[in-house]
Amino acid sequence: MASTRAQQSRAPSIRDVARVAGVSHQTVSRVLNNSDAIRAETRDRVLAAMEQLQYRPNRAARALVTSRTHTIGVLTARRAHYGPAVALQAIEDAAVARGYNVTTSTLTETTDEAVRESIQRLLDLDVEGIVVIAPQQKVFDLIEELGIRTPYVTMRASVGEDPTALWVDQMEGARLATAHLLDLGHEYVRHIAGPQDWIEADARMQGFLREMSDRDMPVVAPILGDWTADFGYHAGRELLRWRDCTAVFCSNDQMALGLVHAARSYGLDVPGDLSVVGYDDIPEAKHFWPPLTTVQVDFAELGRRCVDLLLPRDDEQLRPIDIVPQLVVRGSTSAPRSR
C-alpha cells in the first residue's frame, strides 16, 4: 500500500521564505501578523515567496511559537476495510508512543479535486508528516504530481521498483493461496476477486492468474466482487449451481464467509465438496465453521513501519522491508473427493 519523502525534503521554514523574498525573518513575521509597518511592495514579495515555497500562513504563524507540532496526518479512503482499518489503528498507536498526535482526512471520493482538498486539510493543520492509505493508484500518482514538501509515506499493495517504498506483496499472498489449493490436487479452481479499482484486489487477482498459468491449469475469468459477505453468498449461489469447480479462492474473508453459506444452502460440505480460501485473516476467521484457511497480512506491523519511516530516530537511515503475507491453513480446505 509506501513511498517516503521523510528527511529528503523538509517543510520550508520562515527563514526560507525570508531568503527567497530577500528580507529578514522578522519582516516575514510582521507580514504574517499583518503589521502596518510593512510596505506593500515588501509584503507582496513575502507573499510571493510563500506561494513559491508552498508555505501556508497558518503553518507559519504556529512556527513563530514552536518549530514542531508533533502531529502527523493520515489520508485514507471512506470505506471501512479490515486491512486499512488495522493499519490506521497501528499508526495511531505508534505515533502516540512517539509523542505525536494523529489527524485523519477521509477521501469521500477519489477525484483529483477531492484528493487535493484532503491533502490541503492536512497541510493546513501543519502536520509534520503524512501517511497515505488509498485504494487506487491514481491517488498516489496525483500526490506525486502535487510535489508536496511535507514528508510523506504511502502504503502500496504490490512490489515495485522504488527503493524507498514499503510494500505488501499481495500478489505473492494470492499465489500462496492458489498454490495451496493446487497442491491439494484441485484442478478446477475459481476466484472471487475484489473491486478492480482497488489496487490490492487487482494484485490478488493477478497473483491467482499467474499461479494458475504457471501450473498450466484451466482458468475461468474471475468473478468481480465488492468485499462483502452478501456478494460472496450471491456469487456462490450462482457459481455452485453448476458444480464446475472443487475449490474457490476469495479475495477477502468476508466474501469467503458468504461463499461457505452458499455452499451450505445447497447441502454441500466444506471442505469435502468445496475447499475455500480467504484473505486477510480477520480475527473471526478462525471461528468460522469450518475455520477458514486464509492469507494473513500483518497490517499492524505495516502501520508501525510507516511511522518508523516517517519519524526516524536520531538520524537513523531505515531500509524499508517488504511485508510478506503468510498462508494460514485451517479446516476449510482439503483434497478433492474422487468423482
Image (cartoon, helix red, strand yellow):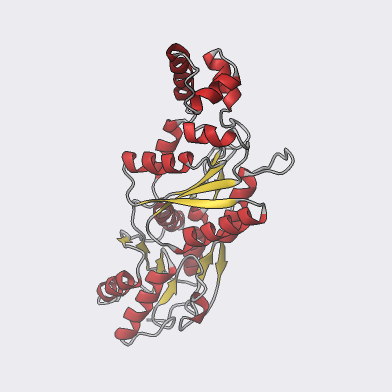
Q: Identify whether 232 is placed above or below 207.
A: below
Q: Which residue is drawn at 44% across and 81% down?
A: 271
Q: Identify whether 20 is placed above or below 279.
A: above
Say which of 225 and 240 sits in front: 225
- The part of the image, by quadrant, that contains residue 301 is bottom right
Q: Which residue lies furthest to the bottom in this view?
A: 267
Q: Quadrant of the C terminus?
A: bottom left
State whether residue 252 appears in this view. Answer: yes
State whether residue 324 appears in this view. Answer: no
Q: Residue at x 47, y 26 (%)?
A: 34
- The part of the image, by quadrant, that contains residue 325 is bottom right
Q: In this view, does 135 lie to the left or right of 125?
A: left
- The part of the image, by quadrant, that contains residue 193 is bottom left
Q: Residue furthest front?
A: 36
Q: Which residue is drawn at 49% across and 55% down?
A: 170
Q: Residue furthest right?
A: 314
Say which of 69 and 72 sits in front: 69
Say which of 248 and 197 sits in front: 197
Q: Where is residue 27 in the image (x, y as percent from the top left)?
A: 56, 19
Q: Position of residue 182 (x, y in %)?
A: 47, 67
Q: Where is residue 152 in the image (x, y as percent from the top left)?
A: 54, 40
Q: Position of residue 52 (x, y in %)?
A: 46, 21
